[in-house]
Structure formats: structure tokens, C-alpha cells
Image: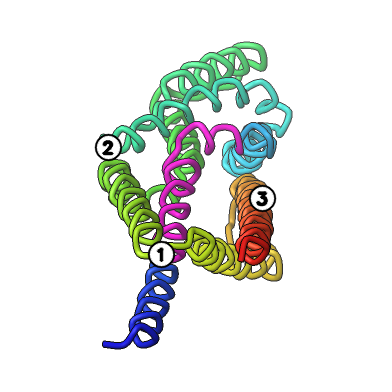
Amino acid sequence: MSKKTKKKVRNIICTILSFFLALFIFADVFCVFTVSYAVNENVWIDQMNSSNYYSDKADEIKNRLVSLGNASGLPPEFFDGVVDPVQISKDTQAYMDSYFEGKNEVVYSSGFKQNFSSELERYIADNKVKTDDKNIDYLVDEAEHVYLASLKIPLLYRLSDYISQFRRILPFAIAGLSAASAVIVIVLFLCNKWKHRSVKYLYFAGAGTCLSLLAVSAVLSFTGGLKSIVLESRALYGMAVSFGTAVTIAFWALTAFFFILSIVLYLIYGNMVRKVTSDD
């Protein structure tokens, strides 16, 4: 095989390796992103706090309870002191813990039930309402059912089987992709006597990763993140929009990072080429 042919074969191999390097880096970034966002309970909680999830959820529960109370003759103002956003946040935290720890669904309602029962007994006593224990128990049970149903997150329920699996698998995937990327970088430097050529292929990989992230960022921006998702709950919709915005910003930040990295590698490559040319 002639020297010219060997050079062509090496260039083809290195170009293919740079493509796989870009692919592995993009997949690695996506896995890290999934660990940091999608299966990170703290991120979910932060999004709930930033989107006023608990206060919106309290309003939703109150509205549903008002509808329930209309059938029993309870005035809307009765429910002002029944629904507590702080209690909702505590029960939601326990609910989230059960999913992200891979346990069965746990939704606590004892605090709400106790508060509702106390307020109902006080209302009956103050207004001298004639009723029996059977009707009281029925109303309390129905109110508890409304509370439990409102706290459940359908999206989390659908993802629950995957969350625990992802949290176990993704660290190994990240380690494997990082190791594969490191091996390719080493091979690129070993295959090229002139190091500026190795930097050129690293530039190709960085640019490829940047373009991949740019495509994802553009799609998220043009589609409005998660704004198009259909959710009956206003609280969930607000959280989804907040989460989608955070995801979009994160992808644009990653795109900007790899864009800058690509520019830096290109400048380094150009500087090394000039040095080699001047030496010759």
C-alpha cells in the first residue's frame, strides 16, 4: 500500500472515529442530562416551587371540594381553612419520595382528613346542623377521595417503572460512553503523527455534537418546550411549562458550550497548522 493510499485510509478512519466520538459525546450528554433533570426528584420539587404548584393545587382541590359541598349544603367559604398548601407540599413530598425510591405509590391524606373532620364538626356545632354520623363519614370519605385523586401525578405514574431502572442503568451508560470517548481521543492522537490533525478531528467531533444539540434546542424552542402538552390540572400544566423552559435553557447552554469549544479547537488547529507551515 502506497503512502498516499495509507494517508487516505487513515483520514477516512479518523473521520469515522470523529463521527462516533460526536455520537458518543451527544449520548453521554443526554444521559447526564436525564440523570440531572428527568429522574432527579430535587429538580421536580424545585419546579413545583418555582411554578407555584402547591398554591395552584390548593385552589384546584378547593374548587372540587366546593362542588362536593354544594350537594351537602356547605357554603364555599367553609373550605377556606380546609385546604392548606403547606400540608399539600408535605404530602406531595412523601408521594414523590415513594416513586423516586422505587416503592409503591404512597399518598398521605391523614393530615387533610383530620383537618377536614375538625372543621366539619365545628361548622355543625356552630350552625346547629342536624345530621348523623353516617352522612358525616360519607362526606369526609368523599373529600379525602378528592384530595388523594388531586395529589396524584399521572405523568409520574406512567414513568414510575422507568425511573428506578434509569437511575440504575444510566451511571453505567455514562461511564461506558465516557470511556469510549476517551479511547477514541487517544486513538486519534496515536494515529496521527502530526498532532494538529488530531485536533482537527476533535474539532469535527465538537462541531458535530454542537449541531446535534442545536437541533434539539431548536425543536424545543419552536415547539414551546412542553407548552403544547395537554393537562387537565392547571398546577401540573404550570409545572410542565416551567420544567420545559428549564430544559430548553439547559440545552441552549450546552449548545453554546460546545459551540465555544468547537471555535477554540478550530483556533488551536489553525495556530498549529501555521506553526508547522512556518517550520517547513
Q: Earlier in the sequence, mark 2 or mark 3?
A: 2
Q: From the image, tell me which residue sits under label 1.
A: 192
Q: What residue do we see at 42% from left, 34% from top? A: 96
Q: Position of residue 164 (x, y in %)?
A: 29, 43
- Amino acid residing under circle 1: Asn
Compare residues 258 and 253 and report the one nearer the observer.
258
Q: Position of residue 118 (x, y in %)?
A: 53, 14
Residue extent of the magenta highlight: 21-47
User: Is any atom of residue 273 visible in this view?
Assistant: yes
Q: From the image, tell me which residue sits under label 2.
A: 102
Instruction: Tell us which disc is closer to us: 3 or 1.
Output: 1
Q: Is 46 one of the magenta-colored residues?
A: yes
Compare residues 68 and 115 and report the one nearer the observer.
115
Compare residues 179 and 137 and report the one nearer the observer.
179
The answer to whether residue 22 is above or below residue 106 is: below
Quadrant where the C terminus sits is: bottom right
Instruction: Tell us which disc is closer to us: 2 or 1.
Output: 1
**Callout 2 environment at 10 Å: few (<14), some (14 to 19), or many (20+)?**
some
Instruction: Tell us which disc is closer to us: 2 or 3.
Output: 3
Helix, strand or loop for disc 1 = loop
Q: Earlier in the sequence, mark 2 or mark 1?
A: 2
Helix, strand or loop for disc 2 = loop
Q: What residue do we see at 51% from left, 61% from top? A: 202
Residue 84, by quadrant, is top right
**Cα separation between marks 2 and 3:** 31 Å
Query: What secondary structure predominates along the stretch shown in magenta?
Result: helix
User: Is any atom of residue 227 visible in this view?
Assistant: no
- Amino acid residing under circle 2: Gly
Q: From the image, tell me which residue sits under label 3.
A: 253
- Amino acid residing under circle 3: Ala
Q: Is 175 one of the magenta-colored residues?
A: no
